[in-house]
Amino acid sequence: MIKVLLAEDQSMVREALAALLGLEDDIEVVAQVARGDEVLAAVGAHGVDVALLDIEMPGCTGIEAAAQVHRRYPAVKLVVLTTFGRPGYLRSAMEAGADAFLVKDAPAAQLAAAVRKVLAGERVIDPTLAAAALAEGANPLTDREREVLRAAADGSTNAELAAALHLSQGTVRNYLSTAIQKLAVRNRAEAVRTAREKGWL
């Protein structure tokens, strides 16, 4: 029996996935969590074979949770699920150790098949997302530029950003300016929006 953990913050979606997977003869959902920061403990407590992780969760993202599980329990297979087919998410998920990356509206049979395939050592990636990720290319933003853009998302001033990130205002201005240039947009709000849409933040 394949032991599966489901991590999804929307209870209706989580329960529907659990019910669908429960219909499979060889799959058992042994744990369900609603937060990313509950994943690692649940994996350890339930002897999970495969963890199904939604990307957008409170506590930490599914990609961050995948990286934690991959470091602590490298034998556990990781399937990342997303509502948003953002190319940058795919790259980030693979770098975090994910074995599969699927969109949530895939048929239930496809999800069950993915669980079996990753356990057999295969990689499973939604073909449309794979093509989009290849076409998009790598994230052009550095870690620092991403950090400053994330902090700028709430409309903070340069002075506020500088204080929060322990940088000078000039350095904050430089990071924002470089990010705006790299993303070929007009201002920081567009830079934040573009980077989010591509899954680069």
Image (cartoon, rainbow, N blue to C red):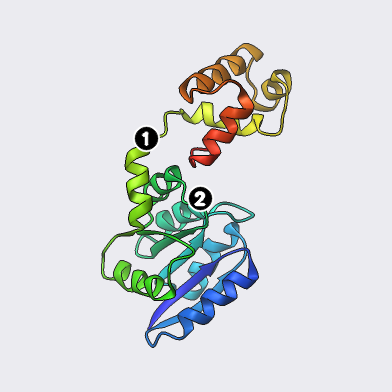
Q: Indicate the amino acid at tag 2.
A: Glu
Which secondary structure lies at badge 1?
A: loop
Disc ID at residue 64: 2
Q: Position of residue 65 (x, y in %)?
A: 51, 55
Left or right of residue 79, residue 175 in this image: right
Q: Nearer the viewer, mark 2 or mark 1?
A: 1
Which secondary structure lies at badge 2?
A: helix
Q: Position of residue 68 (x, y in %)?
A: 47, 54
Q: Position of residue 91 (x, y in %)?
A: 39, 45
Left or right of residue 151, residue 118 in this image: left
Q: Nearer the viewer, residue 131 or 77?
A: 131
167 vs 22: above or below: above
Quarter-of-image position of residue 136: top left
Mark 1, residue position: 138
Q: Indicate the amino acid at tag 1.
A: Ala
Label 2: few (<14), some or many (≥20) within 10 Å? Answer: some
Question: Sequence order check: which comes first, mark 2 or mark 1?
Answer: 2
76 vs 181: above or below: below
Q: Position of residue 198 (x, y in %)?
A: 48, 40
Quarter-of-image position of residue 36: bottom right
Label 1: few (<14), some or many (≥20) within 10 Å? Answer: few
x 31%, y 70%: residue = 119
What is the total number of numbered labels drawn onto the structure image?
2
x 54%, y 63%: residue = 39
25 vs 183: above or below: below
x 48%, y 26%: residue = 183
Instruction: Kindly check if marks 2 and 1 are in contact, taking CB atoms under 8 A apart as contact.
Output: no
